[in-house]
Structures are given as C-alpha cells and as structure tokens.
Amino acid sequence: MDRVLELKDFNVTYKNKTKKVYAVKDINLTINKGDSLGIVGESGSGKSTLAMAILRLLPERNTEITGSSNFANKDLVQASEKELKEIRWKELSVVFQKSMNALSPVHRIGEQIEDIYRVHKPNARKEEIFDRIKALLRLVNLSERVFKMYPHELSGGMLQRVAIAISLIHDPKLLIMDEATTALDVVTQGQILEEIVKMEQTLDVTRIMITHDISVVATTCNKIAVLYAGELMEVGYVKDILKEPKHPYTKGLLSSIPSLSGEKETLTGIKGHLPDLSQKYEGCIFAPRCEHAMEQCGKSKPSETQLTGENRVWCHLYSQSDRGEQLDISKNLAEVNR
Ligand SMILES: Nc1ncnc2c1ncn2[C@@H]1O[C@H](COP(=O)(O)OP(=O)(O)OP(=O)(O)O)[C@@H](O)[C@H]1O
C-alpha cells in the first residue's frame, strides 16, 4: 500500500512565557493513498494543532515539533522553508474554515486563481490556466461566470467552493480540510461534501478531514482517528468504529450525538472536562473521565493494541499490562460492552 503521510512519535508543544502546553503527544499514524481520514475529538483536543503542525504553519518562535512526518520522501519536520514552499499547494494543500476570507476583495476571482496557478507554473499559457480553472470550477459545481466576479458578489458557500477549487489547482497528493465546511448551512455543506467525495473518485487525492462533526466523517471518510487531549484513543475504519466503537471515549463521543436513524435514545455525553494540557500525566489521559477506569489506568499509559485489520486502540481494557501481568481482558470487555 502506498503511504502518503507517516507520522512517527509526533509531538507539538506550545511554549509560552510562563508555561508549556503539550497539545499533541506521541502520534503514530499512517495515511495511505486514497484514504480519507476524519480526525475527530472535542474542542481543544488538538485537531487543528496537528493539522497546522503537519503543514508547518505554526510560528516556530513558540512551538516545538518533535518526531517525524514523512511526506513525499521528505521529513516535513526537518524540511527547510524553501522545501516547504515547493510542497505547499503543489503536493500538500489545505482548506480552513476561513479560507474564503483570504481572497482579495479588489481582484476578480479568476485573476486570483491565475496568480496562485503561476506560483508553481510561472510560464503557463493563458489558455492552459483558463482550461484548468474552468475544470476546477466545474468540479466544485460553480459556473464559469464566477471567473469574472469579485468575492463580494458570491455567497459564503460559493466562496468556500472557490477556496476548495484553489486547493486542488495543482492536483495535490494530500488535501487537509480543517472544519472547511463547518460554517456553511447544512444544505450547502451537504452539497460540497458530496462534490468532494465525487471529486476524489475522479482525482487521485488523499484527504484528512478535521472536524468535530462525526456525521461528516460518517458520510465522507473511510477511516477515523479519535483524538483526546492531544493523544490518539482509537484509529481504524469508519464502518467498524462507528458501528462498534471500542474506546470508552469514542463511545462517549458517539453517544453525544443524536441517532441518524431517528430512534429515540438518551444522549449521555461525557462528564467532566479536558485535563490541563500544561501538565504531564503518568496514566491514561482519559482515566479521570472514564467510567471503566481501573487501577492501572491511573498508573501507566496504555500502549497501542492492534485489533482487527488496521484498527487500533489505546486503552488498558484491551491491552496487557505494561508490567507483563496478563489482564483478564474478557472480563474487561464484558464490562465495557455492558
Ligand atoms: N498558541 C497557543 N499557545 C498555547 N496553547 C495553545 C495555542 N493554540 C492552541 N493551544 C492549546 O492547544 C490545545 C489544542 O488546541 P486546538 O485548537 O488544536 O484544538 P482543536 O481540537 O482544534 O479545538 P477546536 O475544535 O475548538 O478548534 C488546546 O488546549 C489549546 O488551548
């Protein structure tokens, strides 16, 4: 399987005057060609930090990134600014929630897209650029007329489509969407998501989708990574994890959203708050909020447990004790599935 991105022991720490914030910790994650990976977790769990750190868009002055992030035969953590410039847009591109605001209000949409095209292809002919832009606008379901329009003449949904079209201009290998459709109304969001999925079938794009909305992951992703307080809790196929989540945190997240089938059920949610990320913790980071926490959960970090296929979970309920004691896993599982 072709690996597009491989994160190894990836950590991101914010360093302020008075303290450090350990926002992303020990992430080991592989994204294969053609994957669409949804990264979910409650607010403050480190989703955007992870995306920004992969893209190396965090200010170096007050952030520290360790580990490696291999993309296109390069470790992005070590890459120079020049190397990063060559990769951004062309091989690795991003759409943020507010990407549409980056468009200049005084230039026509077409001129702006043309300028971005020329960053990597300075000698491109006018017709080549026009053909490319037309194809991209079609892809995100916008009329060619948009080419001649100014940003203020378009709705928010149309502008965000332009931002998505721009992100695809050089056929990137990897597209990161950070809450890219969150601010749009439900109908527009649904349309854009549908177009993205269709577009991926046409182009060879691998996608990371950062969202707090699990229904977006359910409809547009094949894999899911559940992040809590900067740490991975569970990773695997959407079809398995949404049907049968393993980690108590994933179960809690899923029970916080209404059922799509419309059946009545009590929304339980997860009691408590995210921990203070300026502290380091010995045990499982989720233990203080976990209904199933056992003695060792407060003492040691769970190591990765490989479940079926590519599904993995970080939870003592599924692992053997780090001290070598064999836990009675079947008892634990019966308890967590109760
Ligand atoms: N510049 C910064 N300095 C210090 N701490 C920061 C900084 N930016 C973010 N954080 C902290 O890092 C943690 C992760 O934040 P991040 O924005 O990545 O979470 P998120 O999951 O994307 O949240 P949301 O869904 O609300 O966007 C939070 O505890 C946040 O307070």
Image: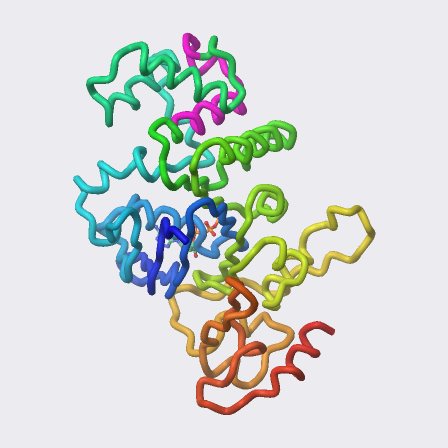
Residue 293 versus residue 4 in the image, above or below: below
Percent from the top left, x then y, of residue 255?
69, 58
Q: Residue at x 44, y 55 (%)?
A: 46
Which residue is at the far front? Answer: 1
* Left or right of 300 in this view: 289: right
**Of residues 8 and 276, which is closer to you in this image?**
8
Which image quadrant for residue 149?
Answer: top left
- Within the magenta stretch, is there residue 148? yes
Colour scheme employed for the rendering of this structure: rainbow
Percent from the top left, x then y, of residue 231?
45, 64
Q: Residue at x 35, y 58 (%)?
A: 7
Percent from the top left, x then y, of residue 318?
57, 77
Percent from the top left, x then y, of residue 63?
27, 54
* Left or right of 17 in this view: 298: right
In this rendering, the count of numbered labels is 0
Image quarter hosting the C terminus: bottom right
Residue 175 versus residue 268 in the image, above or below: above
Q: Main secondary structure of the magenta part?
A: helix
What stretch of residues is rendered in magenta? 147-166
Residue 189 versus residue 252 in the image, above or below: above
Q: Residue at x 36, y 61 (%)?
A: 21
Residue 14 versus residue 101 in the image, above or below: below
Which image quadrant for residue 282?
Answer: bottom left
* Left or right of 2 in this view: 244: right
Q: Residue at x 51, y 17 (%)?
A: 142
- Within the magenta stretch, is there residue 136? no
